[in-house]
Amino acid sequence: MRTKGADQLALQGQALLHLRSRRASSRSSLAQSLDVSPSTAGLHVDQLIAAGFLDDSGRDQGAMGRPKRTLALRPDAGWFAGVELTAERVQAIQIDFSGNTLSKHLDFLPSNPTTEDAINTVTNSIKTLDQSNKSPLLGIGIGAPGLVDPDKGIALDHSLIQDWSDVPIVDRLKKQFDAAVVLENNLRAVAIAERWFGAGKDLADYVIIGPRSGFGIAIVQNGRLTRGAHHAAGEIGRWPWPLNGAKNNETLEDYLSAPAAYRRLAGLSNRGRLPVDLHTALAGLADTTGRFWNRLVADYARVLGLIHLMLDAHTCYLHGPMTALGPRFCEDVLATVPDAFPNLKNNSIRFTPSTLGDNAGALGAASLAMESWIPAPI
Amino acid sequence: MRTKGADQLALQGQALLHLRSRRASSRSSLAQSLDVSPSTAGLHVDQLIAAGFLDDSGRDQGAMGRPKRTLALRPDAGWFAGVELTAERVQAIQIDFSGNTLSKHLDFLPSNPTTEDAINTVTNSIKTLDQSNKSPLLGIGIGAPGLVDPDKGIALDHSLIQDWSDVPIVDRLKKQFDAAVVLENNLRAVAIAERWFGAGKDLADYVIIGPRSGFGIAIVQNGRLTRGAHHAAGEIGRWPWPLNGAKNNETLEDYLSAPAAYRRLAGLSNRGRLPVDLHTALAGLADTTGRFWNRLVADYARVLGLIHLMLDAHTCYLHGPMTALGPRFCEDVLATVPDAFPNLKNNSIRFTPSTLGDNAGALGAASLAMESWIPAPI
DNA sequence: AGGAATTAATTCGATTTCGAAAAATGTAGC
DNA sequence: GCTACATTTTTCGAAATCGAATTAATTCCT
């Protein structure tokens, strides 16, 4: 056969993406979803089966009529690597062709890490994932902290890794691995994980609130990530705090980041010593009541209300260590919103801890690799 | 010829849109821009010429080679109506097929208007525009205040017009006119006007700040309007103000709307009498200096900084009566941003009065009609 | 003036997609 | 078992698009 055109391959990629998200699908329902004729859908499905990506052995008998030949992705067709890099650690995940998690890997960076430390650890973690699999590596997704330029594949800036500035991380990894490499900001990668594996599956407009050592949000509007003109959308951790009359250049993340929240709940000072495992430490404070808890909740309620009025998201998902505080935290925050926003009907606001765990960033990075992959020309 | 398929007509519509935005274009450059082959582009251009929408008589000789046959829209092929409705008045504009303004019309609503008042005035204003033209009316765009559902063509809610709730304004107008009707929120229509006729021509990420009797922003990200999950994105006029510790449920629009700004600059109380022509009155205060001016500027700077960190827009455009304060207002606001955001490099923020005048809403509504129009099947 | 170089537009056979009809594969009722 | 019906899948001629080659229109160079 002649080499196939780019359009056809993109269509086949779309078909595979659709099959990953929907339970059971057939040639006819695929045709409807992708807005192509039944004949075209059938043709491409046959090609994907011949290429080993799909299996149509399943049957789905509806109420009447000829049963569907249900299409299933063949998990062994290949796998994707997802890596989330932060200044502290590297989390890697391996998902198979149908999106199931195969294995995970966790590595820690040395304190005050250099750019080479970071890249080497990322490289090694992918190699570790590779050892456990026979099928081919199809793509690598990287979630990196700070500002990133996904189009150019360059990590632009992050203060907590030495010399982490204009790092051409995609090119560096392409030299090491025979696979496509995609890059995204780690919190925005979480937003993609929420789309594929979380509760935000069918949402077009949602927000990820991801307090960690800093405080940022990832915004999805019209089903697409909002990046902004300089890749810096969602950097509200740099809002002054309190919003009117901040002292000493203090910002929102000095009050609402995960370490700050821990110190406030534990009654420690700004310089108070942090526990090694912030997640567990916060979990220990989950059932707190009293002044400290209420003040933190009130601050979060204020931010949530401001975000809601600005963006009108369907749901805001809380991610990261703060989820250790349990669902009560989000419930209390929601209940407190009307205190600061009296004229706001809070029944349209949703704020809930993500059901995805600590791997959301790595999982999202892998999802991005999965999203951007298309079959190779024959 | 057989009736043409929807895809072809959409492609021809896209071609016309592209020709409206670019100066001179040829079959070959159109093929590149629309990502189709030269032969397909040529075919459709020929059809559009035959249908009377295009003219290829122009020539454009480059440095070398065969000269381009430049394509120009035929202004007489039809026209679009754009209407901006507010609780006070109805502004209508007529643009020809190539996007040039042909005529304008202004009508005032009675005080405390009803929904029927509003719809009748809109209808009459379009009929008035119609009288001055021989070519066919191709589409109508409506910019309506408050929440609107563009997909269903329903104006959902606005407090300043009696019974303005779930108004099926698109259906109402379709019964009166033989043309397609599109609906959008009026401030979001302004954002579209900025794309077609303003400085934001090539921007994918920008924000319209439109203080009027209320205070809202229109957000464009990835080249698309951000509407939110309930059509309520950008409603930051309902932010409490001051942001921490607002008294008496006061909101941002109580301080930063156009009437509020006038009162503050003029040293009047919250109930101070408003001038009939707010625009002119504000223009008279343009060269003010002193405490009142500085406080207003500081408040705007705070809002601008918060928007900037959240959305990372390339540019924020000021629209509406506040532009009467002149470019100095925006300049002063920009210069004041670092006072509240010390760690923010203000060289990446842009804030400038729109070059579009008072008709921006109507012009944007007409642009929306223009954007959504496609040739009729043959 | 004439030929080489350059860019635009068109031609035409091959490829891809469409769309309606036909075939396939089941259930429901008698 | 047989017929009617419902639904999915495949078939096949028509329509649309592509892509490489050809033709067209101009400038540059000698």
Image (cartoon, coloured by chain):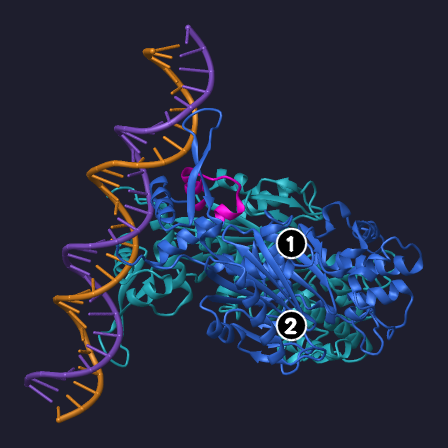
Chain colours: A blue, B cyan, C purple, D orange
User: Residue A240 is drawn in which quadrant?
Assistant: bottom right
- In the image, taking residue A333 as reference, residue A225 lies left or right, namely left
Region in magenta? A18-34
The residue that disc 2 covers is A146
Disc 1 target residue: A206
- Relative image position of residue C13 (x, y in whole percent): 15, 55
Q: Is residue B319 visible?
A: no
The residue tagged with tag 1: helix, strand or loop? strand
**Real-space CA distance between mark 2 and mark 1, rounded to the nearest whole angstrom:** 21 Å
User: Chain for mark 1?
Assistant: A
Q: Is residue C11 above or below residue C6?
A: above
- Above or below, comparing residue B221 to residue A149 in the picture: above
Kindly identify the residue that appears in the image at 57 percent across and 71 percent down.
Answer: A124
Task: Decide if residue B141 is on the left or right side of residue B19.
Answer: right
Looking at the image, which is closer to me, A151 or A141? Answer: A141
Note whether residue A83 is visible. Answer: yes
